[in-house]
Image: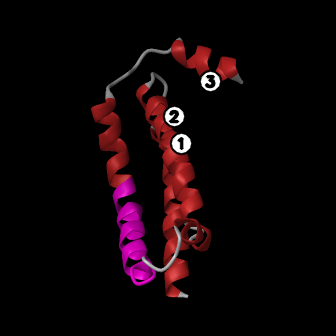
């Protein structure tokens, strides 16, 4: 696993820089990120001061896919920037963020 994670990517050169990768991922992440922020602020604003942070995290299951997507972000960006990397590499970040947006909307709407 370490060989595939470290050695194989180090043999590939960068195709383009971070600017191009960010222009690829930004339009795909704006809608779910805006949804998460909007519903999280509007749906949970009155309860914000009454709970402990641990209780708030436990009561909001949408945090798990969002955190997974954020942890996958560096690997997705690097995979897209390398030679041979394509746009589907960004799905490791995009899909969990979209799942978090779906969970937050279903939790607030219910």
Compare marks 3 and 2 and give the one earlier in the sequence: 3
Residue 5: image tag = 3
Measure the C-alpha gap from mark 3 to mark 2: 10 Å
Measure the C-alpha gap from mark 1 to mark 2: 6 Å
Q: Is residue 43 magenta?
A: yes
Q: Residues within 10 Å of mark 1 (few under 14, many from 20)?
A: some
In-front residue for pair 5/23: 5
Residue linked to disc 1 = 72
Q: Which residues are magenta?
A: 29-48
Q: Residues within 10 Å of mark 3 (few under 14, many from 20)?
A: few
Residue appearing at x 68%, y 21% in the figure: 2
Residue appearing at x 47%, y 42% in the figure: 73
Q: Which secondary structure lies at badge 2?
A: helix
Judge left or right: residue 6 versus residue 25. Answer: right
| Rendered location of residue 43, percent (x, y) | 43, 81
Measure the C-alpha gap from mark 1 to mark 3: 13 Å
The quadrant of the rendering that contains the C terminus is bottom right
Q: Are marks 1 and 3 in contact (CB under 8 Å)?
A: no
Q: Are marks 1 and 2 in contact (CB under 8 Å)?
A: yes
In-front residue for pair 96/51: 51
Q: Are marks 3 and 2 in contact (CB under 8 Å)?
A: no
Q: Which secondary structure lies at badge 1?
A: helix
Compared to 87, does 66 lie above or below? Answer: below
Is the stretch drawn in magenta largely helix, strand or loop? helix
In-front residue for pair 27/3: 3
Residue appearing at x 52%, y 66% in the figure: 53
| Rendered location of residue 26, percent (x, y) | 33, 49
Residue linked to disc 2 = 75
Compare marks 1 and 3 and give the one earlier in the sequence: 3
| Rendered location of residue 67, percent (x, y) | 53, 53
Please indicate, yes or no, whether residue 43 appears anywhere in the rendered image.
yes
């Amino acid at each position: 696993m370490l060989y595939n994670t470290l050695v194989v990517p180090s043999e590939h050169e960068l195709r383009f820089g971070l600017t191009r990768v960010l222009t690829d991922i930004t339009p795909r992440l704006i809608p779910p990120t805006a949804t998460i922020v909007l519903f999280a602020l509007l749906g949970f604003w009155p309860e914000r001061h009454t709970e402990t942070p641990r209780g708030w995290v436990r009561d909001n299951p949408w945090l798990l896919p969002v955190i997974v997507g954020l942890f996958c972000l560096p690997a997705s960006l690097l995979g897209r920037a390398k030679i041979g990397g394509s746009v589907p590499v960004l799905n490791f970040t995009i899909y969990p963020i979209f799942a978090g947006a779906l969970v937050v909307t279903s939790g607030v709407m219910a």
